[in-house]
Image (cartoon, rainbow, N blue to C red):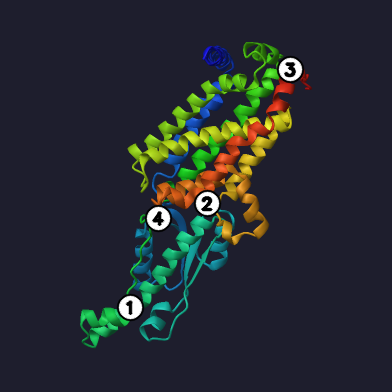
Amino acid sequence: MQELLKMIQQIFQIAVRECGILRRNAIYFFCMVVFPLFTIFFFTTFMKEGQPADMPVGIVDNDNSSTTRSLIRRLDSFQASHIVAYYPNVNEARKAIQENEIYAFLYFPKGTTEALLSSRQPKISFYYSNTSLTAGAQLMKDLKTISTLGSAAVGQATLRAKGATDKQIQTFLQPITIDLHAVTNPYTNYNYYLSTFLVPGILMLFIFLISSYSLGTELKFKDAHELMKMADNNIHVALIGKFLPQFIIFLIILLGYSWYTFGYLHFPYQGSFWLIILLAVLTVLVGQAFGIFIFGLMPSLRMSMSICSLWAMLGFTACGATFPITAMDSPIVALANLFPLRHYYMIYQLCIFNGYSVTTAWFHFMAIGIFLCLPFFVIRNIRKAMLEFQYIP
């Protein structure tokens, strides 16, 4: 019991020492508070509309009839599209796309209305840039809808002139009614989907870097012997005391982010709020554990921080949020499990976003548990580095 009390006292003293280091070094303040808060507010406000709106679209209207002008006005009324320019020919409009003045343009050749009214199937063309996949997909949908509306309007007028009822007209123009359900994200809101993995991923990057940086600076500034002396050369006590203040600060940031997104911005979630808190705790712990592990593998400030930043950035691709893992090559599918962000994203998607049972994500909880155990495999290396290694610039 006395030994336990002594260890707690040592942890407290080391934590107080670490608070002094955090206060004196501005890097900690910016990387643990300023930049994470900036990331949170930047992404959640940058995509606050949910979907891109008023993207620039051009028009090439060589027909210049009341029918084409009506279709252009309808296109301009869509949320994603905004008519910004008219061009005399296709070459000018294509040049505007290449110069990023517009994302798409709609082309009505001369005689479009005449051919449409005489049922001669006129051809109208729409061109869109797929350099930006989101912009290209949204504008393609709007342009395709306008093309369909043009033929539907003529068909409606023709059938009404023949005495058909509104129900008969609707059945003829749309014989199959589509009942569309966007499960768990019915608004197709990019903010709900992207911010909830981009922000934690960037925060995890900061945790990786700060964890390896704080150990590396102990060697750089030759303070490692003081740290070990305060812990009676017990590396477990030294690490717990050193990372406890960082854990508390990062946890407050992540819990504040969770309240801001789910409580204030009302992001949809189906799971328990206690599970959100648990995931925040695990995110901080796994970030610190990975940073400590990398430093234990290579006790070098520059190398450990480089590996941590590389691993964190690759995690954005390997987590499966922007491109499905199942569509990647099988070796990449296996390697994806080596990235902590992959398991965070899967737990969030399964248990919080979709509300499935925790047992559904058992594999990812187990993977996070393995990541938490990684520092124990290199603990001797870290102890040796703290006591014997000399910093190499």
- The amino acid type, in three-letter code, at marker 4 is Thr
Q: Position of residue 174 (x, y in %)?
A: 33, 78
Mark 4 burial class by Cα count in 10 Å: few <14, some 14-19, many 20+: few
Q: Position of residue 256 (x, y in %)?
A: 41, 31
- Between marks 1 and 3, how big is the CA–CA gap? 77 Å
- The amino acid type, in three-letter code, at marker 2 is Ala
Q: Badges 3 and 4: C-beta atoms under 8 Å apart?
A: no
Check disc 4 and report the residue beneath it: 188
Which numbered disc flags the more N-terminal residue, 4 or 2?
A: 4
Between 239 and 316, the one nearer to me in the picture = 239
- Between marks 1 and 4, how big is the CA–CA gap? 24 Å
Q: Residue at the far front: name it.
A: 1
Check disc 1 and report the residue beneath it: 174
Circle on res. 387:
3
98 over 312 or under it: above or below: below
Between 229 and 248, the one nearer to me in the picture = 229
- Between marks 3 and 4, how big is the CA–CA gap? 55 Å
Front label number (2 vs 1) = 2
- The amino acid type, in three-letter code, at marker 1 is Gln
